[in-house]
Amino acid sequence: RIVYVNGDYLPEEEAKVSIFDRGFLFADGVYEVTSVLGGKLIDFDGHKTRLQRSLNELDMPVPEAMDDLLEIHRALVEKNEITDGLIYLQITRGAPADRDFAFPSADVKPTLVLFTQSKPGLAESPQAKTGIKVISIEDIRWGRRDIKTVQLLYPSMGKMMAKKAGAEDAWMVEDGLVTEGSSNNAYIVKGNKIITRHLGTEILHGITRAAVLRFAREAQMEVEERGFSIDEAKNADEAFITSASAFVMPVVNVDGVAIGDGTPGPIAARLREIYLDEMRKAAI
Ligand code: PMP
């Protein structure tokens, strides 16, 4: 696999980052994951815009290659012959000469790393037909979840708790209301109404969420952006999640309780179809 590190395309074995890199020592970094379908990038502009916002919010310097990101994504797709898969991008505050809590001076350049993950048949995941099970856990993450940082230890623990409970993911709950999934935004459907948490600092502003809500409104579906409880989810007709890698994925069970008849619902299925159709058309 060929990866990108600070201007160079290298075999992954040859790619190196300093042990003093602030991403490594302080989780001082941000990332994006963009999916590739049919060799093309899905919603590249959405991911780039959010990346710029994450950098701004953390006063992180912008890498020199910021204007070349599309070209770098495309080069990696080509070099690694990716038809369906993911491109992971990470920017950290770089590698100062020594460890220090204070941000380094301006001469320390950020570290930009990209790599690909090949996922043949990414959009034909069998899970989309069966749906996934989720458990609920307390949301104990920091308060700026709208910034896409690499601080992913608690979401990793959440996935492990889910796995242990025989489920695929964990929905995080704060003050009695679901914030989001461990790596996705969470939705329920009651009647014809799609309910998902409003934007704020409590959740990541999903790029997929924005597109799916736009398509839902264009299809005359009703959308309500507000928090919902696990009890409300258990009594919903449908549930689903969205993310750049899962697209729209039905949720059929919450904390051991079947949602609706325990199979993927029609609204989630329709939104998945519309999302994939439209985003493939707009892919670059
Ligand atoms: N919330 C969290 C916590 C996430 O990690 C992700 C995916 N990185 C999402 C939501 C979904 O965002 P997107 O649709 O941009 O992938």
Image (tube, rainbow, N blue to C red):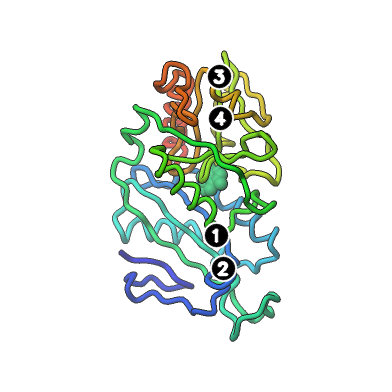
Mark number displayed over residue 92: 2
Give the distance between the C-alpha atoms of the residues marked 1 and 3, in whole angstroms: 34 Å
Q: Quadrant of the N terminus?
A: bottom left
Q: Amino acid at mark 4?
A: Tyr
Secondary element under disc 2, as helix, strand or loop, is strand
Secondary element under disc 3, as helix, strand or loop, is loop
Give the distance between the C-alpha atoms of the residues marked 4 and 1, in whole angstroms: 24 Å
Residue bearing mark 4:
187
Give the distance between the C-alpha atoms of the residues marked 2 and 1, in whole angstroms: 9 Å
Give the distance between the C-alpha atoms of the residues marked 3 and 4, in whole angstroms: 13 Å
Q: Is mark 1 within 8 Å of ligand 1?
A: no
Q: State which mark lies toward you, 3 or 4.
A: 3
Dot 2 or dot 4: first in sequence order is 2
Q: Is mark 3 within 8 Å of ligand 1?
A: no
Secondary element under disc 4, as helix, strand or loop, is strand
Dot 3 or dot 2: first in sequence order is 2
Q: Amino acid at mark 3?
A: Asn
Dot 4 or dot 1: first in sequence order is 1
Tags 2 and 1 touching, CB below 8 Å: yes
| Other residues around mark 2 within 10 Å, as few (<14) / some (14–19) / many (≥20) | many
Dot 3 or dot 4: first in sequence order is 4
- Drawn side of residue 104 relative to residue 131, left or right: right
Q: Amino acid at mark 1?
A: Val
| Other residues around mark 4 within 10 Å, as few (<14) / some (14–19) / many (≥20) | many
Residue bearing mark 3:
235
Quadrant observed for ligand 1 in the rendered image: top right
Give the distance between the C-alpha atoms of the residues marked 2 and 4, in whole angstroms: 31 Å
Dot 1 or dot 3: first in sequence order is 1
Tags 4 and 1 touching, CB below 8 Å: no
Residue bearing mark 1:
150
Residue occupying the point 45% across, 37% down: 247
